[in-house]
Image (spheres, helix red, strand yellow):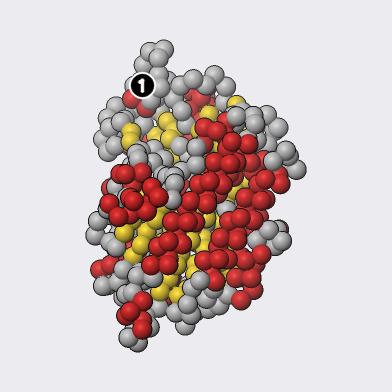
Amino acid sequence: MGLFDRLRGDDDERVVFLGIDGVPYDLVQEHPEVFENLTEIAEAGSAGRLESIVPPESSACWPSLTTGVNPGETGVYGFQDREIDSYETYVPMGKHVSATRLWDRVTDDGRDATVLNVPVTFPPSSRIQRQVSGFLSPSLDAAASDDAVRQVLEDRDYQIDVNAKLGHDDDKTDFIENAHATLDARYDVFTHYLDQDDWDLFFGVFMSTDRVNHFLFGDYANDGEYKEEFLEFYRTLDEYIGAIRDGLDDDTTLIVASDHGFTELTWEVNCNQFLADEGWLSYDGDDHDSLTDIDDETRAYSLIPGRFYLNLEGREPEGVVPESEYEAVREELIEDLESLTGPDGRQVCKRIVKGETVFDGDHDEIAPDLVVIPADGFDLKSGFGGKEAVFTEGPRNGMHKFENSLLYSTDPDLEVAGSNLFDVTPTVLDLMDVEHDGDFDGESLLVE
């Protein structure tokens, strides 16, 4: 539906969804002077804390948020997934998402959807109105769904992602400038297509927030060198959100949401090094940099973020844990993980989740046996080489957090309390009056 349809009397409800990757609810709540527009949206509309998913990692979160189902249905569990019946791994892309995406449901209903910069959407779809795929897209040309979109991106100096390598420098000036440039160009492209006014669903994600949090959140939390730059970045983001809100008509609902929260990072925890030290994992030879290098004495291994797998007979190609001993061995692994404490004496594992309690669906063959939700400050890593210690430090000072994502909306009739990522898709569909089968892990937040 476009502008001319509405002038003819078509008043179907529309939705603009703005994703702000990794922005924690508490950050907005504690700084109303920085987030003036989000604060106004909360006062006039709806707002609250949104629970993330297990594991709280963007590559798993966005497929679940945009389908309403858990990774057992989407088939995407993290930044790195394992092939079925193999130790080979791959980086999930949009083509690996098996569940139906929100914008495809909208399109099937005869409506139009513009989708920009959503993680795990490469390659872009040609069946919806227009799309620019998000991070991990190999190039700007490849990210655009057609030549017209590609030209718009080029004209506005659009970038797929912030240059995270700049964040590794002690001097963060270039990183901050690049983050602002990425944010500015993203807003420029978003407003260009919002002004086209030819969409029913506009779905765009600002991911530069996640990058800024990874490299500057510790400065913010500890009154560090770049705290003011951190807050100034968010002040700009809030201004952009306010400008987009002010440009919408009364038939359009704005939703702003994040996929996970954030907190300060103190230690990187090398999970496979821990497993090796404790006798759970060993390698075939001295050179090892991937899962394929484990040997036939390995009983468990880990993939990022905090996913633990038993090397199970009949599931893994060279599994050594008998199925009859599965529960006993898993409980043994839980005990060892619960005993892991950091250099400061704190317990690393805040919560250990058994896979079957959170993963269920047609694509749960590669579901982990356990997922660890860490205590604040412990960022779980899962490399297979190059680390000689369990606890190390790196250039990042911010990490993902399961709790503390957010949802704000201009619609006052959303009940956000107690909500989670699975609720977003059914909520958007209800707001747009798009019929659906209701087969979601969440439910609509719209109060009748």
Residue at image location 56% in from the left, 60% down from the top:
240
227, above or below 437, in the image: above
Residue 345 in the figure: left or right of residue 391: right
Which corner quadrant holds the N terminus? bottom left
Q: Nearer the viewer, residue 272 or 66?
A: 66
Question: In the displayed structure, does residue 17 sit left or right of residue 315?
Answer: right
Query: Which residue is at the far bottom?
Result: 9
The mark total stands at 1
Question: From the viewer's perspective, is residue 205 above or below residue 321?
Answer: below
Q: Where is residue 420 in the image (x, y as percent from the top left)?
A: 50, 61
At horizontal 59% and vertical 45% (from top left) the residue drawn is: 213
Neighbour tally class for label 1: few under 14, some 14-19, many 20 plus, Cα within 10 Å = some
Residue indicated by mark 1? 293
Occupied quadrant, residue 265: top right
Q: Is mark 1 on a helix, strand or loop?
A: helix
Quadrant assignment, res 148:
bottom left
Q: What residue type is labelled 1?
A: Asp
Residue for point 36% across, 16% down? 284
Decide which of 444, 282 is in the foreground and name it: 444
Residue 374 appears in view: no
Residue 167 visible from this viewpoint? yes
x and y, in percent, of residue 425 in the image: 40, 65
Q: In this view, does 343 lie to the left or right of 448?
A: right
Q: Taking 150 as reference, is 338 left or right? A: right
Q: Where is residue 390 in the image (x, y as percent from the top left)?
A: 57, 26
Quarter where residue 426 is shown: bottom left
Q: Outermost residue, top direction? A: 286
Q: Single out the residue that lies furthest toward the right.
A: 223
Pick the residue in front: 254 or 25.
254
Residue 78 x %, y %: 41, 43
Q: Nearer the viewer, residue 22 or 444?
A: 22
